[in-house]
Image (cartoon, helix red, strand yellow):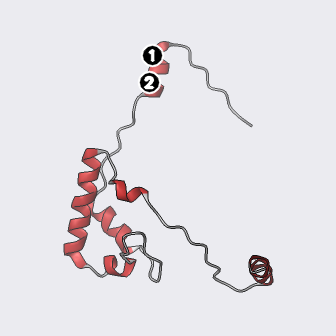
Amino acid sequence: MLQRVSVNSRYEIESLNEEVEVPPPTYNEIKEIIHKLRYNKAPGPDNIISELIKEGGQKLENRIYKLIMKIWEKEELPADWENSIICQSIKKETDFNAKIIDQLHC
């Protein structure tokens, strides 16, 4: 069930349009994200594998953090980060997957 919200004044409308202040990421948050990267994943267009980032040590963590903070301050992503490669991979052989593969190879 949807709930209706009534806006009764111009002030209320303006306050709905205000940007919410979000604090920048902390070094520990970036470090945690790096450590949560999974092994054996295909690299992106830059060909950098997650293993390289995870095993890069504190020096690489510092550089990644500085890069993220620079992006945060500019509020603009690098153009290269807008590109990605999406590849479908079938992890487990099942009757359903085998049927789809057979149909694709006709």
Q: Position of residue 73 (x, y in %)?
A: 25, 46
Question: How packed is label 1: few (under 14 Cα within 10 Å), some, or many (20 or more)?
Answer: few
Quick check: 12 left or right of 3?
left
Label 2: which residue? Answer: 15
Q: Nearer the viewer, residue 106 or 77?
A: 106
Q: Going 23% across and 73% down the picture, which residue do you hit? A: 60
The answer to whether residue 48 is above or below residue 83 is below
Q: Going 33% across and 78% down the picture, which residue do you hit? A: 54
Report the amino acid beneath label 2: Ser
Question: Which residue extends farthest front?
Answer: 106
Q: Quadrant of the N terminus?
A: top right
Which image quadrant for residue 36?
bottom left
Which image quadrant for residue 96?
bottom right
Q: Position of residue 2 (x, y in %)?
A: 71, 34
Q: Going 38% across and 58% down the picture, which residue do you hit? A: 81
Q: Nearer the viewer, residue 98 or 35?
A: 98
Q: Nearer the viewer, residue 6 or 97?
A: 97
The answer to whether residue 3 is above or below residue 8 is below
Quick check: 62 left or right of 30?
left
Q: Quadrant of the C terminus?
A: bottom right
SS at circle 2: helix
Quick check: 96 left or right of 27?
right
The answer to whether residue 82 is above or below residue 40 is above
Pointers 2 and 1 in contact (CB under 8 A)?
yes
Question: Which residue extends farthest bottom?
Answer: 93
Report the amino acid beneath label 1: Tyr
Q: Going 62% across and 25% down the picture, which residue do you hit? A: 5
> Where residue 100 is drawn, which disc sits there?
none
Label 1: which residue? Answer: 11
Q: Position of residue 83 (x, y in %)?
A: 44, 60
